[in-house]
Image (spheres, rainbow, N blue to C red):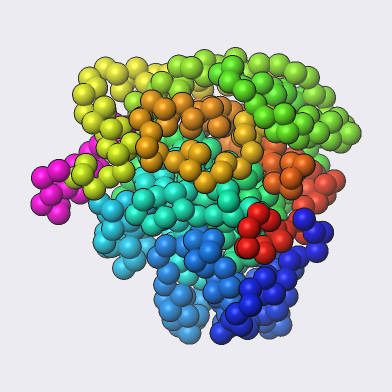
């Protein structure tokens, strides 16, 4: 670990074809866009810098699966919109969000050649913000794992230790940001899939309140409203400014969270006041939590006390076992019709044969469930929301570890060779803290506050009440000023354990 930005080009014996802007990693996305506005650097130079790092570390990290940098170059030549991130290279996660004319395979052989016929609302807002879209990032099949190891594409590797996973399901995006390809990237989060890989890669990961970012025009919500798209980044201000550019309802959305009175970027610089913070270092499932994850969470609690907040240990008060059972039902029932529709479109009698075995088992299980099981599972989400709502009557913030384990070794959380029961147990044992915020629709974030004794990143998790995204950004900005992390970059030798 180093306090200075890593010299990524020096980490490989090859000479990249693209030189670009040598100081690329010394700036966040906001800083790079400012340089473009002043004419100190061009969008083409930023794209060259991104490509030089991609060429240096792909396919060793295997963070990317569908590349279209020529499209980005054409967008630059055509003239980019004047937005907050004009000229900054950006990645889309390979699931959920559509970009016209590009493959959206969602990590599956079944969707290997699925081409998006249109551009979704959120992606259009990325383009309007001036971002230069250059690739899709690797994701597990259907984004259903906390490790990014799809059979269709192979595993992504963690830049801090290539024998380990960057996490999932947004692991390709977080690996790419940690390796310096781009300063921030699109992610999505249905149970912790932004926050877990952000923690494992030493980044700031933010899950907004439900429907603050739109999923239209194709979908209204995903997995009963639990899946929320946004981003992982090095800086808090990038994450906030991106949400300013994308938040707000789509035409025809049946519901949406009200926007804050202030911009999220302005919230980052404001002091949060003295907050009441409830702290829960123990797994709500009663499963083990790695002592180093607990240590970092305790250090985060101590830091909050130093910053003037009131912190006390407590329980969140929701039924984690019921939520674990409900999530399995909701996800299976949502995936099953997508698989069946794709099979019909391709004329495939048995589309399950093209799925990873654990996900085929999941779909088969969902097909056997009665409608009442799904309704009961959705009601469990509502019960979780009520419980967290009561919690946030007493506290402003819920603090916990982000993950219960360190970044997992490759294969440890993958579905290969596992039954659905065994896979699902490992999934929840790894991440028992995060899903409640998906169930309740509340905002939450992972903040990169520590490392293991072996140098692996560990995040601390903070969540707030529904719609209180601005409060989280105020707290995140305060923490970032007190314990800055921007210069903590992986050494990226790529010859073995970092």
Closer-to-camera residue (466/277) = 277
Residue 263 visible (yes or no)? no
Q: Quadrant of the rendered structure where residue 472 is?
A: top right
Residue at figure coordinates x 66%, y 75% from the top left: 9
Quarter of the image containing the N terminus? bottom right
Closer-to-camera residue (433/225) = 433
Closer-to-camera residue (124/333) = 333
User: Eyeballing the image, is 201 above or below 64?
Assistant: above
Magenta residues, dominant SS class:
helix
User: Eyeballing the image, is 244 above or below 273?
Assistant: below
Q: Is residue 4 left or right of residue 442?
A: right
- Measured as percent of width and height from the top left, residue 251 is found at 37, 49
- Part of the protein shown in magenta: 332-350
Quarter of the image containing the C terminus? bottom right
Q: Is residue 81 left or right of residue 376?
A: right
Closer-to-camera residue (158/479) = 158
- Measured as percent of width and height from the top left, residue 308 is found at 87, 32
Residue 40 visible (yes or no)? yes
- Measured as percent of width and height from the top left, residue 198 is found at 61, 47
- Measured as percent of width and height from the top left, residue 90 is found at 53, 65
Residue at figure coordinates x 34%, y 17% from the top left: 376
Residue at figure coordinates x 49%, y 61% from the top left: 62
Q: Is 452 contained in the magenta span?
A: no
Q: Is residue 430 left or right of residue 497?
A: left
Residue at figure coordinates x 23%, y 38% from the top left: 337
């Amino acid at each position: 670990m180093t306090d200075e930005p890593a010299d990524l080009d020096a980490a490989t014996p090859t000479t990249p074809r693209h030189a670009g802007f040598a100081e690329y990693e010394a700036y966040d996305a906001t800083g790079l866009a400012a340089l473009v506005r002043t004419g100190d650097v061009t969008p083409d130079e930023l794209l060259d810098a991104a490509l030089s790092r991609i060429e240096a570390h792909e396919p060793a990290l295997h963070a990317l699966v569908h590349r279209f940098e020529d499209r980005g170059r054409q967008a630059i030549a055509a003239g980019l919109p004047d937005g907050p991130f004009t000229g900054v290279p950006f990645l889309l996660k390979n699931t959920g969000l559509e970009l016209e004319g590009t493959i959206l395979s969602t990590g599956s052989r079944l969707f290997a050649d699925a081409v998006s016929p249109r551009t979704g609302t959120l992606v259009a807002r990325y383009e309007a913000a001036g971002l230069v879209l250059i690739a899709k990032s690797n994701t597990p099949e259907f984004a259903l794992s906390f490790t990014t190891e799809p059979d269709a594409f192979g595993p992504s590797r963690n830049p801090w230790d290539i024998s380990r996973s960057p996490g999932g399901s947004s692991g390709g995006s977080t690996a790419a940001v940690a390796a310096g390809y781009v300063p921030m990237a699109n992610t999505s989060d249905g149970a912790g899939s932004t926050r877990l890989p952000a923690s494992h890669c030493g980044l700031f990961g933010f899950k907004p309140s439900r429907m603050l970012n739109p999923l239209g025009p194709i979908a209204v919500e995903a997995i009963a409203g639990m899946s929320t798209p946004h981003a992982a980044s090095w800086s808090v201000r990038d994450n906030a400014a991106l949400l300013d550019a994308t938040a707000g309802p789509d035409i025809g959305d049946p519901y949406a969270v009200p926007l804050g009175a202030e911009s999220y970027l302005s919230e980052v610089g404001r002091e949060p006041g003295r907050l009441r913070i409830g702290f829960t270092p123990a797994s709500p499932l009663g499963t083990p939590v790695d002592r180093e994850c607990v240590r970092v969470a305790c250090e985060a609690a101590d830091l909050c006390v130093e910053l003037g907040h009131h912190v006390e240990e407590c329980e969140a008060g929701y039924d984690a076992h019921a939520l674990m059972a409900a999530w399995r039902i909701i996800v299976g029932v949502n995936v099953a019709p997508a698989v069946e529709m794709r099979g019909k479109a391709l004329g495939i009698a048995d589309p399950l044969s093209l799925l990873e075995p654990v996900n085929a088992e999941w779909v088969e299980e969902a097909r056997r469930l009665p409608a009442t099981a799904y309704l009961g599972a959705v009601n469990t989400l509502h019960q979780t929301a009520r419980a967290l709502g009561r919690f946030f009557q007493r506290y402003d913030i819920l603090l916990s570890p982000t993950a219960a384990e360190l970044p997992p070794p490759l294969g440890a959380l993958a579905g290969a060779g596992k039954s659905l029961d065994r896979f699902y147990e490992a999934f929840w044992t790894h991440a028992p803290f995060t899903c409640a915020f998906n169930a309740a629709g509340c905002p939450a974030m992972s903040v990169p506050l520590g490392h293991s004794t072996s140098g692996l990143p560990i995040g601390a998790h903070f969540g707030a009440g529904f719609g209180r995204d601005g409060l989280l950004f105020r707290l995140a900005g305060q923490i970032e000023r007190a314990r800055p992390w921007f210069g903590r970059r992986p050494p990226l030798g790529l010859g073995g354990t970092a």
